[in-house]
Image: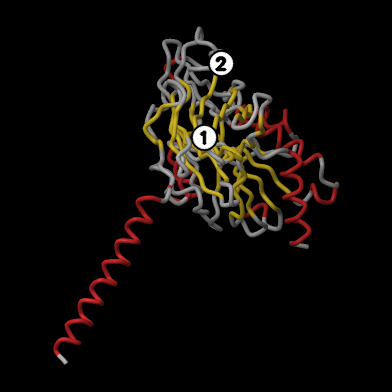
Amino acid sequence: MKRQLWGDIVLALALVALVGGGAWWARSSSPAAPNDAATNANCDLNAGACALRLPDGGTLDLSITPRPIAPLQPLELRVNVRSSNVRPLAIDFRGVDMDMGQLRVPLTPTREGDGHFAATTQLPVCSTGRMRWQAHIELEDASGAKFSTEFLFAAGNVTPAAAGSPPAPAANKEGPPAHRAEVAPTAIAPTPPPAATLARSADDFTLRSAHGPVSLHDFRGKWVLLYFGYTYCPDVCPTALGVIAQALAKLSPEERTRVQPIFISVDPARDTPERLRDYTAFFDPAMIGLTGSADDIAALARRYRIYYQAQPADANGRYSVDHSATTLLLDTAGTLQERLPHSTTANELAHALQQRLAASR
């Protein structure tokens, strides 16, 4: 009996060793699962191409030209895959320092043959400063499973002589330099939350327009498009407000009466109510420009998770303001329903509005 018991114990131990050894061998000899793809977070795309080893043993490299990478300039994206069946599908750009919305850029094969993909885009940065970005590459393996990896890089803070650099913002001719330098070059809001977080608020607010105080509750029963920016913004703000104006023009007259566009300045030191009135009228006569004290604007921006930061003024007192480039869609009760990224087109915005309007009849 004892001999049989010991025999059973030895057999059990042998089976455990066999199973454990087989599992170890399988893990050591098989490629990593797609979801375990490494992150190349330490490679700066502003300095050169970045390479990554893929789960099946192949390699992928990503490059962006021209360099230094400048905002609002055409950029060429190149993705090359070697010794791998993995196929890159798209690149999602996200701001690290501020929520600029998600800019998705589909990748297409080039004439160079298998493994070569390319795309062109622009980064929506309203700044002469420097901003960090994440480039998330969506990949698909031979079985159709999708996974992703990311790279970090910085854009901006380039000299006008550098290749691809944007021109310096036009000089501000209104007000003395001392007045323009009142905005401190410090962050107004804390580090952004995860992009998936959607802040909702039905709280009211009151700011100043050229025609007197304006409150959110004045527009109960209407859908509100809310955009935070400033009138001296050289690129992103005009583009975003232009998209809003084009989208509103695509609505029927009845639909148009049920939507109110509002532009809130993150630069109260320079943007007077009168200046905002003239600025918004250029895009749409119904658009309302609002301002308030620096504290009021900061508190409202925090509520809606809008992030902005004034850059240091130059010798002439000129400065820019980094800010989130998302358009907020509020429902008829003043509750935030959607954050639309800067990449949203006029057709997409008009379609989103028409769907909301039809559902809320």
Label 2 neighbourhood size at 10 Å, few (<14), some (14-19), many (20+)?
Answer: some
Q: Quadrant of residue 170?
A: top right
| Whole-percent x, y for residue 103 in the image | 59, 37
Extreme-right residue of the structure: 253
Extreme-left residue of the structure: 2
Label 1 neighbourhood size at 10 Å, few (<14), some (14-19), many (20+)?
Answer: few
Seen at 47% across and 20% down, the residue is: 319
Seen at 52% across and 35% down, the residue is: 83
Seen at 56% across and 33% down, the residue is: 229
Q: Secondary structure at mark 1?
A: loop
Left or right of 255? Residue 219 is: left
Q: Is residue 210 above or below residue 68?
A: below
Left or right of 100? Residue 186 is: left
> Which amino acid type is shown beneath numbered disc 1?
Ser
Left or right of 226? Residue 307 is: left
Of 258 and 31, nearer the camera is 31
Q: Where is the C terminus found, in terms of image quarters?
A: bottom right
Q: Where is the N terminus found, in terms of image quarters?
A: bottom left
Numbered label attached to residue 166 = 2
Is mark 1 in CB contact (under 8 Å) with mark 2?
Answer: no
Residue corresponding to mark 1: 83
